[in-house]
Amino acid sequence: FAAAAKTWTTPWHINFNQLRYPDIPARPIWDARKVPLARFLEENYPIFRAELEAIVNAPDVADGYEALRRADVSVESLSTPGGWDAIRIVRYGHWNENFCLFAPRTCELLKTRKEIAECPYVNTNYYKLWPGAHLKPHFGNAPRLTAHLAVIAPEPLRSGLTVGPSQSLWIEGKS
């Protein structure tokens, strides 16, 4: 701990992955081409998008996304209500069967990835960010590498992700 802590000069540098994986460089944002899970997400983007659009535009409910979100009481949020909503796909090894009924191909694909299917601490979600909303700065559990995929970005290049001092804008189909 002491050796890794010497490199932490600001809160942005705190990265407990250095303790578990001292020989792997820490980066706030990785090149998706170098992360197999990110490449997988991008390759399967058309399927993820088609199933998510079917949920959002479900003809038998006013808002399919909101209906699925409200049906799952296990979701945590790092935002104030109306800012950032989530639909859980899998959390700590427990799959959201309701979600999988509406997005079967998405679940089938995600279950092929050992990073998701075999990790007891995994959280895989769809997030909906409302206009003008912000996610509170936070530190996640470690060790971990987080992969994000912009599935539907109504205002491309106007919203994004900040990790430490690095920023990345949401581009549909890109991790």
Image (cartoon, rainbow, N blue to C red):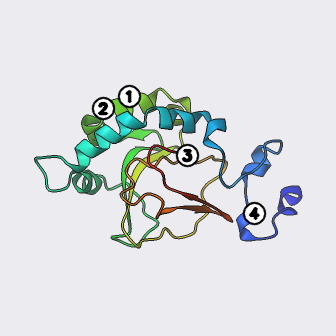
Q: Is residue 2 above or below residue 149?
A: below
Q: Earlier in the sequence, mark 4 or mark 1?
A: 4
Identify the amino acid type marked 1. Answer: Glu
State the SS at label 1: helix
Identify the amino acid type marked 3. Answer: Ala
Can you give x and y, in whole percent of width and height, for residue 38 in the image? 56, 39
Image quadrant in which the N terminus is located: bottom right
| Tag 2–tag 3 contact (CB < 8 Å) | no
Q: Which residue is mark 3?
A: 147
Can you give x and y, in whole percent of width and height, for residue 127 in the image? 40, 55
Residue at 42%, 29% (x, y): give it.
109
| Tag 2–tag 1 contact (CB < 8 Å) | yes
| Tag 1–tag 3 contact (CB < 8 Å) | no
Using the numbered discs, state the Cα–Cα distance from disc 2 to disc 1 in whole angstroms. Answer: 6 Å
Q: Which residue is mark 1?
A: 108
User: In the rendering, which numbered label is found on residue 37?
Assistant: none
Q: Which residue is mark 2?
A: 104
Q: Which residue is mark 4?
A: 13
Residue at 30%, 32% (x, y): give it.
104
Q: Earlier in the sequence, mark 3 or mark 4?
A: 4
Residue 6: which quarter of the image? bottom right
Using the numbered discs, state the Cα–Cα distance from disc 3 to disc 4 in whole angstroms. Answer: 19 Å
Nearer mark to the viewer, of 1 and 3: 3
State the SS at label 2: helix
Identify the amino acid type marked 4. Answer: His
Q: Nearer the viewer, residue 83 or 88?
A: 83
Q: Earlier in the sequence, mark 2 or mark 3?
A: 2
